[in-house]
Amino acid sequence: MKRVPLALLVLAAAPVATPLAAQSLLYRPPNLSGTWVADVGVVQFNFLHRFHVSQSPVNEVQNFPTFTLATGLGHGLGLGWHFGTNSFVGPGRLDNNESEWFVRWRARGAEGRSGFSVAVTAAYNELAQSGDGEIGVDYTLRRLTLSGAVRGMTHPFREPDAKAALAGGAVVRLTNYIAVSADIGSRVNPTTRAAWSAAINFLIPSSPHTFSLQASNAATSTIQGNSQGLLSFDGSGSNQILYGFEFTIPLHLKRFSPWFHGTPRPKLVVPEGAAVVKIAQYKFATDTVRIAAGATVVWANDDVAEHTVTFDGSEPGSPPIPANGTFSHRFDRPGTYSYHCTPHPFMKGVVIVR
């Protein structure tokens, strides 16, 4: 148990760096999609798993996973699919597989930037046989993001009449790597139990992944699933709490093919006569660099994760270099300078100064 507080302390004390792209869990509460749209050239895979353990002596575990696949199409457009099992959206209880296909257009703003962002989502829920939609609004001010949503469903939970739902939430980023969030949402119906969630979210340092520990009374993470809380399994009418986690995995296609460029790098400006070492696919593109004394080497991070240039001797190295970031160092004395990446020590290189 002592390792958990220690891990949190390490994350809190990690060097300040710009969060990587596609870090949706640091900018949206668990039951709100916010205005998030996957980046171009990225296939986003999110795995949300919630579960309930019944009281003893049974201690039965009931699982409620939701899988998300999404990609960015450019111009603020994104296409995606939510698939959940053990859904309460369809007829009966449990053992229902729920599919929701959605298109989202972020009409204004961008994730993580200060000010307002607005997105419109159109979706079709196959299990409920319902056309659904959502207008999401985010407002970000420094480490705080406020989120709101207005939802519409033609056949909520397979009911014949259309219904609307409202939701709101907030995220507070305690550091660049840790955030806490909460939300609440409900159909506009006084007899419907509101859906809520609370979470602590982590950006895994030097990686494009985020991780979240959650508590909620909503099962599947779809427009309908996030608009109504679960009734208790034992029929007592008490509020049902599920616990679980979410893990986001952005698969950057440019790692596999040059056809997928994703977000372009800003124009690289280097000093005259400087040598450039590109970082891509978790390796230094040039293992050995030979320069004259007084020359400069520029490391350009074209990878999807943070990297460092850490020298094996006393030469000062770099802080974490974010994606599309650079680090420059001038070598004034002849010698051999070996270096590695601290988060990924298998990445090594050498600078030979004549």
Image (cartoon, rainbow, N blue to C red):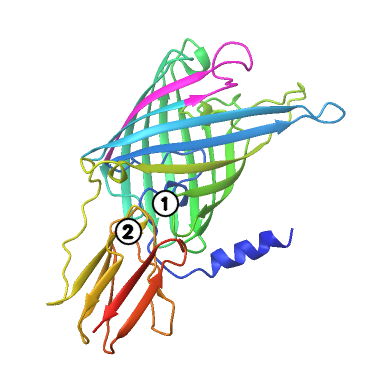
Residue 244: quarter of image: top right
338 or 170: nearer the eye?
A: 338
- For the C terminus, give its image quadrant: bottom left
Q: Which residue corresponds to the image point at 37% horizontal and 24% vertical from the top-left?
A: 123
Q: Residue furthest left?
A: 272
Residue 164: quarter of image: top left
Residue that mark 2 sits on: 323
63 or 340: nearer the eye?
A: 340
Residue 49 versus residue 304 in the image, above or below: above
Q: Which residue corresponds to the image point at 37% horizontal and 33% vertical from the top-left?
A: 70
Question: Is 96 contained in the magenta span?
Answer: yes
Q: Is residue 35 visible?
A: no
**First along the sequence among labels 1 and 2:** 1
Residue 294 image position (x, y, % from top left): 21, 87
Mark 1: which amino acid? Pro
Residue 279 versus residue 87 in the image, above or below: below
302 or 110: nearer the eye?
A: 302
Residue 48 image position (x, y, % from top left): 54, 36
Provide the secondary structure element on which disc 1 rests.
loop
The reply to whether dot 1 and dot 2 touch (C-beta < 8 Å) is yes
Residue that mark 1 sits on: 208
Residue 46 image position (x, y, % from top left): 47, 37
Q: CA distance from mark 1 to mark 2?
A: 9 Å
- For the N terminus, give its image quadrant: bottom right
Question: Is 45 contained in the magenta span?
Answer: no
Magenta segment boundaries in residue numbering: 83-106
Mark 2: which amino acid? Ala
Q: Residue furthest bottom?
A: 333
Residue 281 versus residue 287 in the image, above or below: above
